[in-house]
Amino acid sequence: MENLKIKINKVDKDLPTPSYKCHGDAGMDLYSTETIIIQPGEIKGISTGIRVAIPFGYEMQVRPRSGLALKHGISMINSPGTIDHGYRGIVHALLVNHSKEAYEVKRGERIAQAVFKKFEVIDFEEVEELDETDRGDGAFGSTGKFN
């Protein structure tokens, strides 16, 4: 199986190129281009210093890092963030501080991870009725049936 080729433009050439830490990992680390403080409850868009050319039919998902979430309460406000194939700007991670302490993001720190996903392009077909299912229109926990 041949690997998907993604063209990358490193705007900040001093930072590492995103790569997998271990063979078989799904996500590649993305790095902060700046040192910045995120106050409790605050949201900051942090530049990763890269631009990418994603092939049609794929998206790049920008996801939080579990270590930052567990140790510091840092996550992403739009998880996962989607980078579409037509976007050619700098990729940012929209970080949010869920903790009660200010957090300093340091230049070169791993702040997010990138996962590339294939998706289907669809056309909606408008209909008057949908087929019936056992669940029907039950939502938000409605499948938790007790016997």
Image (cartoon, grey):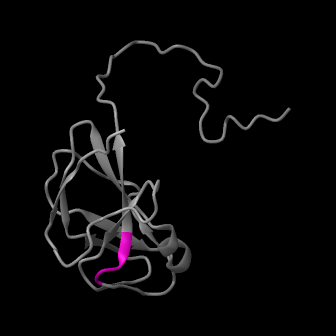
User: Where, quadrant-wise, is the N terminus in this rendering?
Assistant: top left
The majority secondary structure of the magenta stretch comes to loop
- Identify the image quadrant of residue 44: bottom left
Answer left or right for 55 relative to 124.
left
Residue 91: percent from left, percent from top: 23, 62
In front of the other: 74 or 100? 74
Q: Position of residue 61 (x, y in %)?
A: 35, 52
- The residue that appears at 24% across and 76% down in the rendered structure is 15
Residue 119 in the image: above or below residue 63: above
Q: Quadrant of residue 124?
A: top left
Q: Nearer the viewer, residue 30 or 73?
A: 30
Q: Quadrant of the C terminus?
A: top right
Above or below, comparing residue 134 to residue 91 in the picture: above
Q: Is residue 30 magenta?
A: no
Q: Nearer the viewer, residue 145 or 110?
A: 110
In this rendering, is residue 70 above or below 57? below
Residue at 67 percent of width and 36 percent of height: 142
Check the image and name the residue furthest to the right: 147
**Horizontal side of residue 73 vs 90, given as left or right:** right
Residue 106 pos. (x, y %): 33, 85
Q: Which residues are magenta?
A: 107-111
Residue at image location 34% in from the left, 38% down from the top: 118
Between residues 21 and 72, which one lies in front from this camera angle? 21
